[in-house]
Amino acid sequence: MNEFLTWLLDAVQSVDPVVRTLLAGVAIMLETSVLIGLVVPGDTIVIVAGTAVGSVWEGVLLGIAVVIGALIGESIGFWLGRFLGPRIQHSKLGRRIGEENWERSERYLRRRGGPAIFISRFLPVLHSLVPLTVGMSGYPYRRFLAWTVPACVIWSTLYISVAAVAAGTYRELADQLHYAGYIFVAIIVAFLVLVFVSKKVIERAERKHLEHDEPGDAADSGAAVDMED
């Protein structure tokens, strides 16, 4: 196990740091882009890139690249929503998402306003659809950034830090413990399980804002999002 893992981590680290950083940024840009993000495993690529971080500054630069990539991807979704609107929703790719997912995104933004932008970054499907929905709603771009930037920073910091700590711990223990590789795997798996559980907890907590319109809410279905949120 140790030999294979050492070879794998060395292979990742052998890639030019600039290339690694750019690849991670592009991957997360695609992962957060409308529709494309539903099939690109950006989080996996960020974790892989994070295992090669050898210093605080490398981690910071990788984090900056990931945040910028995420903001570009989400901004693309925002402006597509602003200028193309329902045409994307009713396109061939848009129909594959399913009407229910589009309705959930619109309903969530209408009911939660700004916090929906922040929270959706940590929820599957919605993290790709909400930026588009926000653009369609007329919500100000600066307010959109004010909510999504902190979410992107938190997300990237968590993923990169865990990957870097797991890889660093393994390299320190590899020559001392024959099962060091299993410790690395355990850290990554535990983190991914925690992420999965956290998403479920958030979804449950936000369910009342995601479920079908309640009596009396239908009147607000066409209302714009509160610009002060």
Image (cartoon, grey):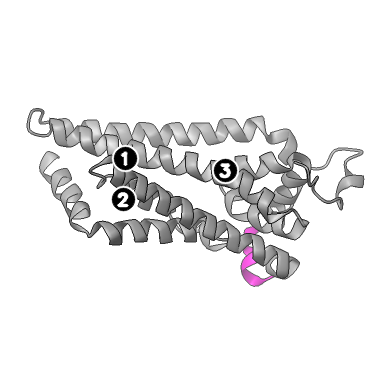
What residue is pinned by disc 3?
Answer: 123
Please tell me which residue lies in front, 210 or 11: 11
How far apart in space, not on screen, are marks 3 and 1 (Cα)? 20 Å
SS for callout 2: helix
The crowd level at tag 3 (other Cα within 10 Å; few <14, some 14-19, many 20+) is some
Percent coordinates x, y for residue 33 in the rendering: 55, 60
> What kind of residue is marked 3?
Leu
Which range of residues does the magenta coloring cover?
90-97
Q: Quadrant of the C terminus?
A: top right
Q: Is 60 left or right of 81, judged from the image as shown? A: left
Seen at 53% across and 60% down, the residue is 72
Of 89 and 26, the residue lying toward us: 26
Picture quadrant of residue 35: bottom right
Q: What's the mark number on residue 49?
A: 2
Find residue 170 and report its horizontal and vertical position in percent: 19, 35
The amino acid type of the residue labelled 2 equals Ala
Residue 142 appears at what percent x and percent y?
Answer: 67, 52
Q: Earlier in the sequence, mark 2 or mark 3?
A: 2
The residue where tag 1 is placed is 163
Tag 1–tag 2 contact (CB < 8 Å): yes
Which comes before the other along the chain, label 1 or label 2?
A: 2
Question: Residue at left 74%, top 53%?
Answer: 139
